[in-house]
Image (cartoon, helix red, strand yellow):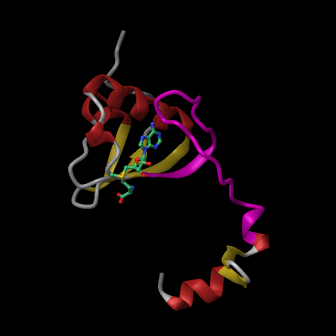
């Protein structure tokens, strides 16, 4: 990590560095099994890079659907270089095709009933 970020956002401790306490109030650190646990909600940004490529198509679509559900309106999703939205394509607007940055659209598309 660049030292400017380390000094700005972390506090040195005897065991290393901790995220500044005033920042911690805005952050939730938690373990989440994306395949089994309920999705978090009211999220502004999800960065999920190089995980979807390891699971099958059906599971990918379920995880992406959970991401869409958990994001705030106009929340952002970052995927890895080789990852795709698949049937959730219409549920997101593309912000940057090369860097796989997407923005949530209000209505979930691609799964019409
Ligand atoms: C190939 S690594 C990618 C790490 C990092 N995002 C990157 O791009 O370098 C895949 C990550 O997915 C995590 N992972 C595997 N199964 C998971 C699951 N069911 N739920 C959440 N994370 C999982 C692993 O712990 C690992 O950190």
Say whether residue 46 is left or right of residue 15.
left
Residue at x 58%, y 84% (from the top left corner): 6
Query: In the rendered structure, does residue 28 fall within the stretch colored magenta?
Result: yes
Say whether residue 104 is left or right of residue 21.
left
In the rendered image of this protein, does residue 65 appear above or below residue 74?
A: above
In the rendered image of this protein, does residue 42 appear above or below residue 13?
A: above
Q: Quadrant of residue 112?
A: top left
Q: Quadrant of residue 104?
A: top left
Residue at x 69%, y 74% (from the top left corner): 18
Q: Nearer the viewer, residue 3 or 22?
A: 3
Residue 70 on image: x %, y %: 56, 37
Q: How many marks?
A: 0
Say whether residue 22 is left or right of residue 8.
right
Q: Give the residues drawn in magenta, as a range.
A: 23-47
In the rendered image of this protein, does residue 73 appear above or below residue 113?
A: below
Say whether residue 44 is left or right of residue 24.
left
For the C terminus, give its image quadrant.
top left
Residue 79 on image: x %, y %: 34, 51
Q: Nearer the viewer, residue 84 or 97?
A: 84
In the rendered image of this protein, does residue 5 appear above or below residue 112?
A: below
Q: Nearer the viewer, residue 113 or 2?
A: 2
SS assignment for the magenta stretch, majority:
loop
Q: Quadrant of residue 60?
A: top left
């Amino acid at each position: 990590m660049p030292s400017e970020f380390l000094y700005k956002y972390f506090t040195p401790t005897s065991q290393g560095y901790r995220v500044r306490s005033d920042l911690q109030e805005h952050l939730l650190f938690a373990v989440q099994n994306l395949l089994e646990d309920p999705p978090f909600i009211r999220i502004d940004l999800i960065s999920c890079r190089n995980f979807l490529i390891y699971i099958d198509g059906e599971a990918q679509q379920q995880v992406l659907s959970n991401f869409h559900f958990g994001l705030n309106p106009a929340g952002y999703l970052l995927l890895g270089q080789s990852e795709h939205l698949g049937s959730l394509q219409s549920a997101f607007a593309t912000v940057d095709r090369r860097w796989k940055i997407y923005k949530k659209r209000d209505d979930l598309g691609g799964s019409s009933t």
